[in-house]
Image (spheres, helix red, strand yellow):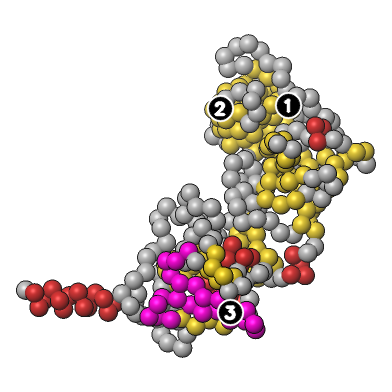
Amino acid sequence: MKKSLALLTLSTALMATGAAHASTGSTPQPTAAVSVPEAAAAPFLIKINGETLVETGYQVPGSSEPMIPLRSTAEKLGYALEWKQETLSVDLQKGNLFTTVKTGEDQYVINRMYTTLGAAPALVDNKLYVPASFVSKVLHTEASVQGQAVVITPEAEAQKNVVTTGVVTAVTYKENHRSLQIQGTGTNGTVLHISEETVLEKDGAKLGFSDLHIGMTVEVEHPNRMTLSLPPQTSAYRITVLDAEKGTDLLATAGEIQEVRSGDSKDDFSVVLKGTGLTDRSQTEIVLRVGAETPVVNLKGEKIPASTLVKGTKIIGVYGPVMTKSLPPIGTAWKIVVNASAE
C-alpha cells in the first residue's frame, strides 16, 4: 500500500511540472494550471497598435484590473521570452530592457528593483497571465482599459490628444479636487480630472465648474491614455457643453423602468423609475413625465428613439427639483439616458 501511494504521488508531481505554454522551442505539456474562473467577467480584448490579438484577457469580480496573456502581448511588442519550467517563471528581453516574472508571485522587477502590481502572474490553461498594468509599469508602454478592451498604444500615438463625447453621470468636488464622470456610473465610464488649466466652455463662452451638472452632454479633449483602474481616469484639457439649454439644480436616478404609463397624447407618457439616486436629493423611486421634446440619448449623448423606453430598460432619469408630494413623487424628465454600455 505504501509503495502504491508513493508511485501515485510521484506520478502526480511529474504531471504538475510539465512545460507550460509560456515556454519556447518545445511542445506544451500538461501542467498544474487552472481554468479561467467561472465568475470572471466577459473576455477583455487586447488591442496593440490598432490590431486585436486572437487571445483575450479576463477579470475576476472584485479585482482592480484585467489579466492579460503575457506571451502574445509581449511578443507583439517585440520582446523575446524564455520559459523556465523549474521555477515556473519567464524571462523577457528587448534591447537593454530585461525582466522576469514568476507564477504566483506579485513581485516584478523595474529598474533592478522589485515592486508589486496588486496581482500575481497566474498560470491559466497553460498560459501565463499578468495584470494589465504590467505593460505600462514594467514594459514602459502606454496601456489603458477602454470598455472590455485593454488598448496598448505606441509612444507616438499615446502623446496625441483625443476627443470623447458623453453624458455626465457624476460631478465631484472634494478637498479642492474636481472631477466629472461620463459614459456610465460606478465602475463604468470614465473619470475626468479637472485642473485650473482645464478650459470649460459652451458656445465659445467660458464656464465655471459650478455650471457643470449631471445629465449634461459634453465633449472632452483629453490625453490618449488612462489609468488601468475601474473606471479608468484621465485629465481633461477642454470640456465643451453641447446641450442647447441649461438645467437648474438637476437631480438624477439610475435604475430600471418598472412601468410605462400612457399620457394625454401619443407623444406624452410617463415612466416609473426605481433605482439609485445619483445626488443627495435624488429619489430612489420616481415617476417621470416624458414629452415629445424630452431628449432621449445613449451614454455618448447620441439621440435614440423614445420607443426604446420600455419596461425593464435601464436608464438614468435626469429631472428638476420640482416634484409632487405623492409616493412615489412625480416630476418632469429633463433628459433620459439609456444606460447601455458605450461601444
The structure residue drawn at horizontal position 64% and vertical position 51%, both measured from the top left corner, is 232
x, y percent for residue 4: 11, 76
Identified by mark 2, the residue type is Lys
Q: Is residue 226 visible?
A: yes
Residue at horizontal 28 percent and vertical 77 percent from the top:
15
Frontmost residue, 186 versus 95: 95
Percent x, y of residue 336: 69, 33
Q: CA distance from mark 1 to mark 3?
A: 54 Å
Q: Which residue is mark 2?
A: 274
What residue span does the magenta drawing correspond to?
Answer: 84-106
Q: Nearer the viewer, residue 275 or 159?
A: 159
- Is residue 50 magenta-colored? no
**Quadrant in the picture for residue 125:** bottom left
Q: Amino acid at mark 1?
A: Leu
Q: Which residue is mark 3?
A: 98
Q: Where is residue 41 shown, x and y percent of the image?
A: 49, 53
The label on residue 17 is: none
Instruction: Compute the Cα span from label 3 to label 2.
Output: 54 Å
In this figure, which residue is indicated by the disc labeled 1?
250
Q: Residues within 10 Å of mark 1 (few under 14, many from 20)?
A: many
Q: Is residue 105 magenta?
A: yes
Q: Is residue 212 left or right of residue 92?
A: right
Spatial CA distance of label 1 from label 2 is: 17 Å
- Note whether 250 is above or below 67 in the view shown: above
The picture places residue 212, in percent across and down from the top left corner, at 79, 35
